[in-house]
Image (cartoon, helix red, strand yellow):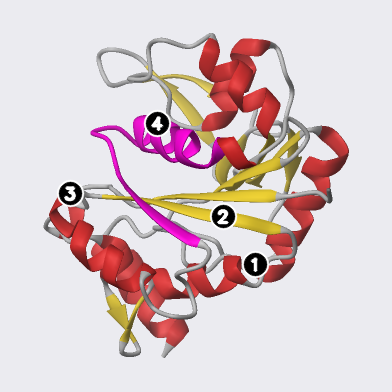
């Protein structure tokens, strides 16, 4: 049996800084932005299943998208958790039965709809070679450590500081092992943190294209300008 890739798209975020709007369902150019990602991952070589963790409030809308003829054979919708980490865990439990330890799990935030085919292929290639890999960009700003009273305490060396993005692509066996050893998910902000607790290093791939996360109204305005 050939190599397989299971895809997880956490999409259950509350979107509080956008007034509680479900970011993946925001329409740009007449279509929900999540369709860009679904189309991208459906074309991915070796993809076996795409599991999207959706909020309860919009579960029906996501299920109607997954029921479209072009998606229904690949996409499964699960109810997301209160925390991103729980959404990813629930989605992994839904697809892990079809994945061997040597297969890959690709986790990508629904709020990053500009992911390019080139960057996706690059991070997946790195994960096949290194067991785990993720996109991350170099920090460009000068970084300051601030004390409890609000004063600058020191300047941090930024030469080795990267801002983590997604996709985060991990061998399924490693992810199983990590979940088996983790009980406190409230402090887990991404899946690379799970690997760090195993002592496993993930390879860093710098993105070649824009891959920002929709967080504020300014981000949304920029996305609309790019896609218009």
Answer above or below: position of 193 versus 138: above
Name the element at disc 4.
helix
The label number, if any, that marks residue 220 in the structure image: none
Q: Dot 1: few (<14), some (14–19), or many (≥20) neighbours within 10 Å?
A: few
Answer above or below: position of 194 versus 54: above
Precedes in sequence: disc 1 or disc 2: 2
Of tags 3 and 1, the one toward the viewer is: 3
Which residue is label 2 attached to? 49
The reply, left or right, for residue 102 in relation to residue 18 is right
How far, Cα to Cα, is label 1 from label 2?
25 Å
How far, Cα to Cα, is label 2 from label 4?
19 Å
The reply, left or right, for residue 129 in relation to residue 197 is right
27 or 39, nearer to the observer: 39
Residue drawn 43% across the image and 74% down it = 35
Of tags 3 and 2, the one toward the viewer is: 2
How far, Cα to Cα, is label 3 from label 4?
16 Å
Precedes in sequence: disc 3 or disc 1: 3
Instruction: Where is residue 78? Give x, y as percent.
Output: 33, 47
Of tags 4 and 1, the one toward the viewer is: 4
Marks 1/2 in contact by CB < 8 Å: the verdict is: no
Name the element at disc 1.
loop
Q: Magenta part of the protein: which range?
A: 75-96
Which residue is label 3 attached to? 56
Q: Quadrant of the C terminus?
A: bottom left
Precedes in sequence: disc 3 or disc 2: 2
Which residue is label 4 attached to? 85
Which residue is label 1 attached to? 209
Residue 94 sits inside the magenta stretch: yes
Precedes in sequence: disc 2 or disc 4: 2
Residue drawn 25% across the image and 14% down it = 149
């Amino acid at each position: 049996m050939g190599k397989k890739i299971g895809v997880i798209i956490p999409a259950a975020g509350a979107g509080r800084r956008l007034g509680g709007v479900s970011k993946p369902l925001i329409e740009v150019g007449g279509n929900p932005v999540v369709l860009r990602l679904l189309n991208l991952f459906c074309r991915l070589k070796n993809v076996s299943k795409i599991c999207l963790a959706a909020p309860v409030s919009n579960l029906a809308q996501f299920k109607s998208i997954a029921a479209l003829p072009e998606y229904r054979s690949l996409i499964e919708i699960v109810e997301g958790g209160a925390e991103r980490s729980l959404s990813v865990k629930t989605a992994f439990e839904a697809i892990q039965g079809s994945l061997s330890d040597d297969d890959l799990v690709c986790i990508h935030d629904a709020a990053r709809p500009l992911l390019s085919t080139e960057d996706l292929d690059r991070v997946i290639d790195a994960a096949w070679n290194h067991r785990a890999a993720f996109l991350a960009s170099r920090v460009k700003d000068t970084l300051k450590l601030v004390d409890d009273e609000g004063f600058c305490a020191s300047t941090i060396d930024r030469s080795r500081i990267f801002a983590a993005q997604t996709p985060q692509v991990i061998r399924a066996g490693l992810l199983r092992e990590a979940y088996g050893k983790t009980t406190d998910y409230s402090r887990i902000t991404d899946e690379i943190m799970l690997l760090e607790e195993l002592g496993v290093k993930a390879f860093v791939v710098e993105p070649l294209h824009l891959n920002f996360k929709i967080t504020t109204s300014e981000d949304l305005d920029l996305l609309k300008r790019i896609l218009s």
